[in-house]
Amino acid sequence: MESIKDRVAIVGMGCTRFGERWDMGVEDLLVEAAYEAFEDAGIEPKDIQAAWLGTVFSGISAMTLAPLGLQYIPITRVENMCATGSEALRGAAYAIAAGVCDIALAIGVEKLKDSGQTGVKGPAIVGDNPDGSSAIGSGYSAPASFAYLGTRYFSHYNIDRDEGKRMLAEIAVKNHQHGSLNPKAHFHNILTVEQVMKAPIVAWPLGLLDCCGVSDGAAAAIVVRSDMAKSFRGDPIYIKGMAISAGARQGSMRQDYDYVHIDENVRASQQVYAQAGVKNPRKEISCAEVHDCFTAHELIVYEDLGFSPRGGAREDIFGGTFTLKGELPINTDGGLKCFGHPLGASGLRMLYEMYLQLQGKAGPRQVKNPRLAMTHNLGGNAGAGIGCCVIVGNEK
Amino acid sequence: MIGITSIGAYIPRYRLTLEEIGKMWQVRGGPGEKSVAGYDEDAVTMAVAAALDCMKLNNNQADALYLATTTAPYKEKQSAALVAGAADLEKTAFTADFTNTLRAGTTAIKAAVDAIKSGSARNALVVASDCRIGAPMGRFEQLLGDGAAAIMIGTKEPIAMIEGVYSIFSDFTDYWRTERDSFIQSGEGRFLEEEGYMPIMTEAIHELMRKYSLRQKDFNKAVFYAADNRNHASLAKALGFDKSQVQDSFFTKIGNTGTAAAMIMLVAALEEANPGDRILFAGYGDGADACILRITENISRIKGTPVMEDRFARSVSIGYGKYLLWRDLIPVEASSLPERTEPSLATRWRERKTVRALYGVKCRRCGAPQIHPNGQRVRVCIACQEKDDFEDYKFSDKTGKLFTYAIDQLQPTKNPPGLNGVVDFDGGGRLICELTDYDLDNVETGMTVEMTFRKLYQGKGIVNYFWKAKPI
């Protein structure tokens, strides 16, 4: 088995402003993200030889990408819940690595706000029928499925309610601090710990401000053979590793799962570190975008990805380790929390920020001398998830 | 000898005080309170709870189940079959609904006795359950409560023998609901008592006593239906029973529970009975059924189990607004939150063992009990990956511990916030499910729960029943 390391490069990226985009439909978002990427890579749409489109709810099949007007090339629509955007990248990158095409497009989109609903309906889940009906129809919300983690983490590490809430609030405050520096983010407001702690509870311990934005948006990447990369631009970035680990609901069905970590996260990160040759992620990763759909998840991701020791996230949170000025800046663009979370676009939006950071183009959010950057998604939830990690670097 | 071999009852935990109703309408609310089925309960779920309570005392599988109710969730579709499924009876059990009259409970008992007598059944489970609704601002609103009772009829070591039965029918029109009525209608009070209830009940009971040459003093307890406390007292007096002989109606504690009322009283009387006692038991509605019960030595078998007062004790008062909401008596603003997934008839049928009695599987190779959170069939062992080598494993009768939980403000429910939890069953297996009948302030990781059959929600016009966890 050959490693994916350094075989694929990213030479152009685009990302729409995320938010409540009442002004734009799915087609507008796709065109906006794709054309920014084309321009960034210095290519024409006709140069694209194959495309992978990721979306969870906002379309089906290759026809969803029709607004781009690509001329009869192979297009594949992929879906892997919240890891959908990263899944589109995987499809495109593998095709390049396989040598079956030289220039491919990975694009993700989601239009959540046109539904008129508050929050996001869970996608059809295993056990449901394809038409969206089910035997039982579990009624719990996405925040509830992540609240399990917070409640259990507090209980497992004997953290009192106030301290626990404060710890989660710090994560939200950090991500809004970062996002406030980002014109493309859904939100730009700076939060205080008190504001987050006092926000209406959605699913204890998660309050409204512990939850990510429900947003519209799209992001795109132009992926090429790495030996061609420099012909497109002087500062391409290279894929060092890509991994997905899908659970089989072990955590939902087995008592030995503890709800203070997520195996799918751990395994995906171990795979990607092995591919990229990373021995000490805390030291070697310059910055990362992780799946902060809810603050309680970012908390355990610090430990799952090996940035903090087990039970050590609290100390790192209060110590400012993951802020822009800290030892390992995380979610430098605001994360899902502040940048927003259009499901199918999120993985590529994370990559967009890491791309800017590695090129030194992140403006006021710029991390000092980054070398390796990482993205992480979790599709599904604790107990039944899809962990996905990507590492990119600016040197071959 | 044919008799009662086991008893059970279920009283929902919620209470609406008559004072609260009075406050709503600015009238004097009487003393006492009525039991109110939870937002996720109906006549079927309460019947399941009573049936399981009854079967706990007596491991005999029932081979017949008769359900008495006037508030079946379906007009066309049998409720007894739903109850039998949740109670996990063999599919050869004979099921029937007895309905359209408050006498349905005693009528079902008489039919059960006949079934045993004829040899067509060995153990017949009779369950009565009702959730009748009085129109807001009316007297029935103050009067009617919700509850269920179950009685097993059989021949094996009965706790009470049935010595005699006497029935009469009457087409006297006193209380009714037509095809189109949601609420009960009735005639004028004194007319109903003087020309209906009193003469019909008196005749049935007197004829029964005459037939078996018994007098008032031969009975330790008289247990009989009445519409309200006034009716109850009038009949006791007319029959010549002393106050000490008359079983409490519980009307001020739980209200009039319809078809279940007389059977709930009977269960309470049996819980306090001693060997040799004789009990008079009578039901009323479009006639009357009366019977004589004689307590046996086997009554000791039920001593030490929870009694009716224990069932009343764990109660929680609710406000009038909640009552309106739970009983669908008021339109409310549509939620902008995502709705629940629609139930599928085909999926519910395919996963019926899980939906009905919460069956999962146990791996024959590694021994791990397991159940899929969406009811889906397990084909590959979650622990050892062995394929298709399982035996059925029932979770509905297992207790468990709450490993972690989420209080969910976004869950579509008539009793927000929703509470969801990860339940680790004693003996193995884990299920993520909804919880019910909890005190939010006392929910904590590690608490002990049991499973209870409830309505999850209605969708596509059907009632979507499933199991929830409930703190013990």
Image (cartoon, coloured by chain):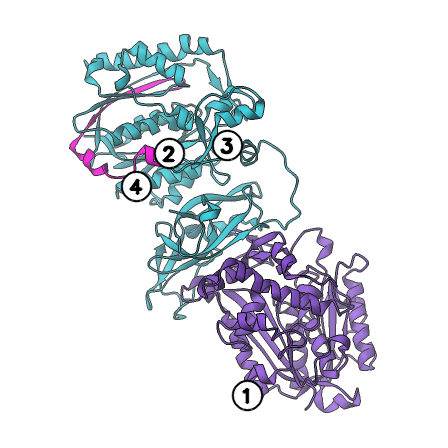
Q: Which residue is mark 1?
A: A1
Q: Which residue is mark 3?
A: B75
Separation of residues labelled 1 and 4 (CA atoms): 60 Å
Q: Is residue A282 left or right of residue B284?
A: right
Q: Which residue is mark 4?
A: B55
Chain where mark 4 sits? B
Label placed on residue B312: 2
Q: Which residues are magenta?
A: B284-312
Q: Looking at the picture, how far across and down is residue B442, in whole percent? A: 44, 48
Separation of residues labelled 1 and 2 (CA atoms): 68 Å
Separation of residues labelled 3 and 4 (CA atoms): 27 Å
SS at circle 3: loop
Q: Are marks 1 and 3 in contact (CB under 8 Å)?
A: no
* Of labels 1 and 4, the one closer to you: 4
* Of labels 3 and 4, the one closer to you: 4
SS at circle 4: helix
Question: Which amino acid type corresponds to the residue marked 3 in the rendered image?
Answer: Lys
- Say yes or no: labels 3 and 4 on the same chain: yes
Chain where mark 2 sits? B
The residue lying at 44 percent from left, 34 percent from top is B43
Separation of residues labelled 2 and 3 (CA atoms): 31 Å
* Of labels 1 and 3, the one closer to you: 1
Say whether disc 3 or disc 4 marks the residue closer to the N-terminus.
4
